[in-house]
């Protein structure tokens, strides 16, 4: 069958109210969107001519969410005026129907699970429990028999000291695709903005923050630069690769080609992408214009700084990123250049 456009039925509800002589304002929006003929990216079981994926219509998706904004004017005087506010939003997407059951989409080495009852594109990989410091630890992890995997030829390969301790989810002693599970959700629990504006006579100071909380990120760049298995330059953190028996290391042994798959897609590369960023700071001065200057309606001198401060535990270059508009690209950081700080001076003339 030929693919066709998705169709979406939308229901939006909004409420806007002001209190205390417009000193306090509340704006609330809620939405429900149901999408049919969902476009999904699937993989060929037997790739032909280098084409691995194809698009098809199938399934249904439900999106629900809300956004609330609260503004307040605690100071309204002749020379002083203060306005503050904040917004918070939350959304949830849920797959309600799939024609052929759950499927996995691979992007930049990340496996994304799409299944009924869950959001689109959950991170799906291996859970880990550190690095084996000794062979004895590796043997104990498999109930006195080494955990193992099978190589491309089907030969048994034991995990030993210096290898990552992948969790054997089905307890069969073998680390394989059946041990994969959900290891992260790229959707934030909450996101929004915080803003403030202070006016004193002709001087105005504006601050704008944005934030995101609870979203997981696949740090693709770190998975390459901490791998210790290629000829790529490595980050300074790579000095803590396992090196000798008993070494308590954060990173596994460095070995070209990674024969044991220590750098496979796992929760080692999933990070908390939460952040709070001071996005803009703007200071402006409205120059008093003599009444006799009828040709000049206004003159404003202003300065603005962007991306001044970011608070985050994320190890990548920038927690606020986007590599694409598609739902599957959310939460995958492939190493985009970080948003730089910018400082701008301006003059606004109204004639």
Image (tube, rainbow, N blue to C red):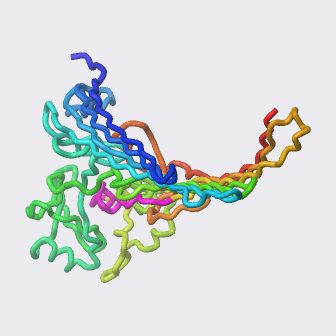
Let me know if residue 336 appears in the view.
Answer: yes
In the rendered image, residue 77 lying in the magenta stretch gets the answer no
Question: In which image quadrant can residue 164 be found?
Answer: bottom left
State the residue at coordinates (32%, 37%).
13
Q: Is residue 138 left or right of residue 226?
A: left
Question: In which image quadrant can residue 289 be found?
Answer: top right
State the residue at coordinates (56%, 52%).
338
In the rendered image, residue 269 lying in the magenta stretch gets the answer yes
| Number of marks present in the image shown | 0
Q: Depth check: 36 or 265 in front?
A: 36
Judge whether 187 appears above or below 159 on screen: above
Let me know if residue 120 appears in the view.
Answer: no
State the residue at coordinates (17%, 55%).
176
Q: Is residue 6 left or right of residue 222?
A: left
Q: Residue 122: x, y in percent?
A: 27, 48
Residue placed farthest to the front in the image?
21
Q: Which quadrant holds the C terminus?
A: top right
Residue placed farthest to the right in the image?
292
Q: Residue 67: x, y in percent?
A: 38, 46
Judge whether 235 appears above or below 288 on screen: below
Judge whether 58 appears above or below 120 on screen: above
Q: Residue 125: x, y in percent?
A: 25, 54
Q: Which quadrant holds the N terminus?
A: top left
Question: In which image quadrant can residue 308 be found?
Answer: bottom right
Which residues make up the magenta segment?
259-276
State the residue at coordinates (45%, 68%).
238
Q: Residue 247: x, y in percent?
A: 34, 81
Q: Depth check: 138 or 289 in front?
A: 289
């Amino acid at each position: 069958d030929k693919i066709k456009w998705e169709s979406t039925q939308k229901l939006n509800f909004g409420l806007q109210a002001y209190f205390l002589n417009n000193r306090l304002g509340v704006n609330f929006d809620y939405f429900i969107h149901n999408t049919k003929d969902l476009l999904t990216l699937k993989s060929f079981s037997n790739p032909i001519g280098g084409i691995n994926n194809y698009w098809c219509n199938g399934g249904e998706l439900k999106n629900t969410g809300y956004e609330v904004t609260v503004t307040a004017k605690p100071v309204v005087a002749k020379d002083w005026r203060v306005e503050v506010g904040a917004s918070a939003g939350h959304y949830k997407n849920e797959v309600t129907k799939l024609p052929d059951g759950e499927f996995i989409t691979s992007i930049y080495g990340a496996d994304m699970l799409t299944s009924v009852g869950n959001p689109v594109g959950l991170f799906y990989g291996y859970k880990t429990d550190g690095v084996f410091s000794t062979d004895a630890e590796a043997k104990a992890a498999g109930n006195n028999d080494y955990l193992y995997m099978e190589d491309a030829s089907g030969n048994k390969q034991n995990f030993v000291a210096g290898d990552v301790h992948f969790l054997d989810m089905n307890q069969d002693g073998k680390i394989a695709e059946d041990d994969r599970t959900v290891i992260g959700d790229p959707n934030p629990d909450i996101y929004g903005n915080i803003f403030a504006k202070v006016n004193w006579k002709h001087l105005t100071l504006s601050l704008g923050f944005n934030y995101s909380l609870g979203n997981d990120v696949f740090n693709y760049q770190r998975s390459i630069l901490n791998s210790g298995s290629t000829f790529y330059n490595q980050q300074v953190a790579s000095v803590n690769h396992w090196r000798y028996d008993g070494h308590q290391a954060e990173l596994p042994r460095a070995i070209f080609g990674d024969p044991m798959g220590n750098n496979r897609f796992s929760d080692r590369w999933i990070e908390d992408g939460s952040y709070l960023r001071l996005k803009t700071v703007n200071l402006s001065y409205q120059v008093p214009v003599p009444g006799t200057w009828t040709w000049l309606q206004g003159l404003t001198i202003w300065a603005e700084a962007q991306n001044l401060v970011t608070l985050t535990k994320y190890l990548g270059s920038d927690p606020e990123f986007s590599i694409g508009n598609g739902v599957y690209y959310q939460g995958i950081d492939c190493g985009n250049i970080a948003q730089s700080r910018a400082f701008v001076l301006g003059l606004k003339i109204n004639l």
